[in-house]
Image (spheres, grey):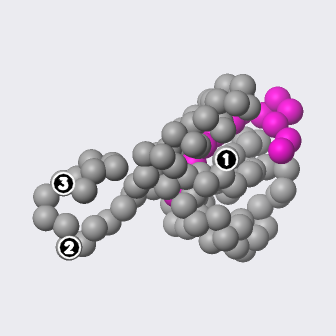
Amino acid sequence: MTLANKPLAIVTGASSGIGLHATRALIDKGWYVIMACRDLEKAQQAARSLDLPDHGFEIAHLDLGSLDSVRTFHTAFHAKDQALDALVCNAATYLRNRKGHALTGRP
């Protein structure tokens, strides 16, 4: 990980679509990005597909459908003792057959 004096952003859902391209744009502007993704292999493939520079990002596991995963991510990030400059809340879950709304971690 190379932060130097770069601003730090966490981008959720960074393994595809808007999250991936937001990651690319932030890195291109000099930011260091933590790609917070549920599927680490998919995130690694996505980073390679855009040829993201190794010094501009890291991939961390985060499944927003699991409060245990959120707690683990928070604990790991907090242990780094780094200031967070931006949080890009991009991840979403689409439950096509679900009737009504649901809360994270609830049935």
Q: Residue at 57%, 37% (x, y): give it.
A: 74
- Does residue 71 show up? yes
Mark number displayed over residue 101: 3
Main SS category, magenta section: loop
Q: Earlier in the sequence, mark 2 or mark 1?
A: 1
Q: Secondary structure at mark 2?
A: loop
Residue that carries the numbered disc 2 in the rendered image: 97
Q: Which mark is residue 22?
A: none
CA separation in Å, label 2 and label 3: 11 Å
Quarter of the image for residue 15 reads bottom right
State if disc 3 and disc 2 touch (CB < 8 Å). no
The reply, left or right, for residue 50 in relation to residue 67 is right
Which residue, given by chain and number where applicable, does mark 1 sit on? 34
Q: Residue 89: image x %, image y %?
A: 46, 46
Quick one: label 2, few (<14), some, or many (20+) residues within 10 Å? few
**Measured Cα–Cα span from mark 3 to mark 1:** 29 Å
Magenta-tinted stretch: 1-13
Q: Residues within 10 Å of mark 1 (few under 14, many from 20)?
A: many
Residue 48 versus residue 76: which sits nearer the camera?
A: 76
Residue 43 visible (yes or no): no
Instruction: Identify residue type, mark 1.
Output: Ile
Quadrant (top left, top right, bottom left, bottom right) of the C terminus:
bottom left
Task: Report the mark closest to the observer, 2 or 1.
Answer: 2
Quadrant position of the N terminus in the picture = top right
**Amino acid at the residue labelled 2:** Asn
